[in-house]
Image (cartoon, rainbow, N blue to C red):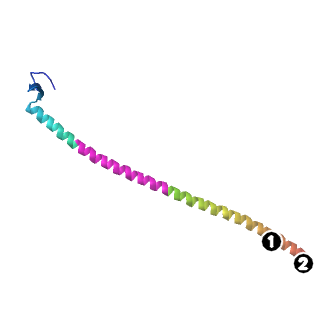
Amino acid sequence: MSYSQETYPKLAEINGDTVVLLSIGQVTSINETYEQNKTLKQKINVLDSVYNEQASYSSQKDSLIIQKQQNIEIILNKNRKIVEDNNKLRKQRKWLVGLGAVGGLVIGLLIN
């Protein structure tokens, strides 16, 4: 835009106040720009809403994943404990079988 007094916009003084005079084309252009900006702001608001909804969904999904991972870890820890207990029982059983065999041998020797 040129601010020359020979082209629009022109500065004029009316009753001691300075005003800007615009051509009809300039007013039309300003109005079109204003409407475009208004439409763009509405689109931005919609996109912000969609983004916030997606961010919320993503956060919920992340929370569920963390919860599932914690549940899996609990199950794995329980399974490890069961395996450890089974291994201890196997060792005890082997020891008892060995003890039984020795006891049977001793009794067998005593009977003879």
**Vertical side of 111 occupied by 46: above or below:** above
Q: Which mark is residue 100?
A: 1
- Spatial separation of the CA atoms under disc 1 and disc 2: 16 Å
Is residue 60 found left or right of 84 in the rendered image? left
**Vertical side of 41 occupied by 2: above or below:** above
- Quarter residue 14 falls in: top left
Name the main secondary structure of what is drawn in magenta: helix
**Residue ID at (46%, 55%):** 65
**Residue ID at (49%, 56%):** 67
- Tell me the amino acid under the disc marked 1: Gly
Can you give x and y, in whole percent of width and height, for residue 4 in the image?
Answer: 13, 21
Is residue 14 found left or right of 70 in the rendered image? left
The region drawn magenta spans 40-67
Can you give x and y, in whole percent of width and height, for residue 32 in the image?
Answer: 15, 38
Local SS, label 2? helix
Residue linked to disc 2: 111
Q: Which of 5 and 57 is in front in this view?
A: 5
